[in-house]
Image (tube, helix red, strand yellow):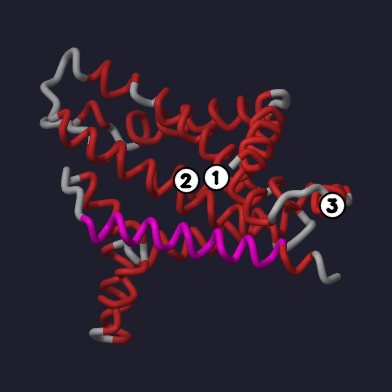
Amino acid sequence: MGNTLTIFRRELGSYFTSPIAYIFVCLFLVFMGVFPFLVFGFFERTTPDLRQYFDFFNFAFVILVPPLTMRLWSEERKSGTIELLMTFPFRSWEVVVGKYLASYVVVGVTLLLTLTVPISIGTVLELDWGVITASYIGAFLIAGVCLAIGSWASAITENQIVALLVSIVVLAVLAAVGFPGVSEKFETIVGGLAQFLRWFGFYSHYENFVRGVINPVDVVYVVTLTAFFLVLNNFAVELRKFR
């Protein structure tokens, strides 16, 4: 645990002593402020609610999490510091978890800042804060999956652009296969298999949270997928020891 905290503090410091964290926070807040409200006309609806706002967290994660995570391991590999890091008395999984948690803190702080939106709207509209709480729990959990995928993508290459593209593609696929329109297309092609594929997409699981339902199945899905990609991340790091 002590080694994990050491890596965590190192990575968190690197985020906030460089423009990376601040750029991410600003872009995320701008994205979540512009698209749901200005582009898709939230205030023009006769019965506005925040469901569409929370739906946009999916798109924000797919687009903005990869740039946040692309440097986690790629920069270490390119500069050669990963070899130095592996000479310290750290287990690979301790480094993996430490880096992952540091990126999670950046996203967690950003999600907390978005609370200003429902708080502001709550002054003029009656909101269901139980649903909003469930939606934020879902967003926080799905963010964990996206960060684990981004961290894994960064660990398999020393090129940050490649890591960025790989994580965007994987996240886009996982987001798309659970999307109703896409799953309907799949159903015309593969029939009943579409429902099976839809289960692997995080959109359908996240939608349950947005409806205010915290289903243990959705929590298990998120935890399992996160753990799976962290294990892949650790495996990619372990392979470096034999090269």
Q: Could you tell me the amino acid type at mark 3?
A: Thr
Q: CA distance from mark 2 to mark 1?
A: 5 Å
Whether label 1 touches label 3, CB < 8 Å: no
Q: Which residue is mark 2?
A: 61
How far across and how far down the image is residue 163, in percent? 68, 57
How crowded pointer 2 is (Cα within 10 Å; few <14, some 14-19, many 20+) is rated as many
Q: In terms of image quadrants, where is residue 210?
A: top left
Q: Could you tell me the amino acid type at mark 2?
A: Phe
Q: Locate the C terminus by quadrant.
A: bottom right
Q: Could you tell me the amino acid type at mark 1?
A: Val
How far across and how far down the image is residue 122, in percent? 19, 18
Task: Give the mark, 2 or 3, whose residue is nearer the N terminus.
Answer: 2
Whether label 2 touches label 1, CB < 8 Å: yes
- Using the image, tell me which numbered label, if any, was put on residue 179: none
193 to 122, vertically: above or below = below
93 to 45, vertically: above or below = below
Element at badge 3? helix
What residue appears at the point 75 percent right and 61 percent down from the top-left corner? Answer: 157
Q: Is residue 54 magenta?
A: no
Q: In terms of image quadrants, where is residue 91?
A: bottom right
- Residue closer to the observer: 158 or 162: 158
Q: Which residue is mark 3?
A: 87
The residue stretch that appears in magenta: 216-237
Q: Which residue is mark 1?
A: 65
Q: CA distance from mark 1 to mark 3?
A: 29 Å
What residue appears at the point 63 percent right and 38 percent down from the top-left corner? Answer: 2
- Residue closer to the observer: 51 or 219: 219
Magenta stretch secondary structure, dominant: helix
Q: CA distance from mark 2 to mark 3?
A: 34 Å
How far across and how far down the image is residue 58, in percent? 39, 48
State how many labels appear.
3
